[in-house]
Amino acid sequence: MGNRAVITFDPNPTGDSLGVYLHWNGGPESVYAFLDTLDHYVVRDNSDAPYQLARFVQIVGNFLGGTLSLGVGHLRQLDCDNGDNGLYAVTRISKERIVRRSDGSLTEWWSEFRVESERVSAYKHPYHTAADSIAKAIHEKNDAAFKES
């Protein structure tokens, strides 16, 4: 069992697109917190996709710790059709973020209403509203690595 998801920053993903596999913390409550952390640390956006992907992996890896539960590869190699949270396709440009979701296919995407409804629900989840929010935990694990030099 897991709470799996794959995240890609390719706005038009194909099997050759790079993605990040999460075995844990793949639900929207966590994924949106990881994406918010990119903004918090002012990580480059889709205009510098390789840098954005690398820093996203760093943020998640620092948070998860250990040597398991996180992978990077082409979407065709990753468990996109994972029975949990499927595939997130994220586009970050400047301060705008577009998130699309699918059950793991590269052809059938959720409606914008469903994705927006999920986002609103995720930010109401205790992961975000509790004093010990996931955002706070992610920042605690990453602040030293991302401090200004």
Image (cartoon, rainbow, N blue to C red):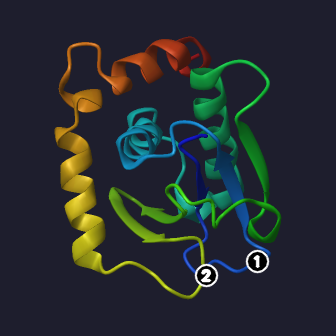
Structural crowding at the residue carrying mark 1, measured as other residues with C-alpha within 10 Å and reported as few (<14), some (14–19) or many (≥20): some
x and y, in percent, of residue 34 in the image: 46, 39
Q: Mark 2: give few (<14), some (14-19) or many (20+) Cα within 10 Å.
A: some
Residue 86 shows in this picture:
yes
In the rendered image, the vertical position of residue 15 relative to residue 44, given as above or below: below
| Residue at the disc numbered 1 | 15
Locate residue 61 relative to residue 5 in the image: left or right.
right
Quarter in which the C terminus is drawn = top right
Residue 148 in view, yes or no: no
Quadrant, the N terminus: top right
Task: Give the farthest residue toward the bottom.
Answer: 107
Task: Say which residue appears at 20% left-offset and 50% top-offset.
Answer: 121
**Cα separation between marks 2 and 1:** 8 Å
Task: Assign a secondary structure to mark 2.
Answer: loop
Residue 128 % position (x, y): 25, 31
Name the residue tied to disc 2: 106
Indicate whether 2 appears above or below 52: above
Q: Is residue 44 left or right of residue 40?
A: right
Give the residue at the far front of this rendering: 1
Dots 2 and 1: beta carbons under 8 Å? yes
* Residue found at x 64% / y 60%: 49
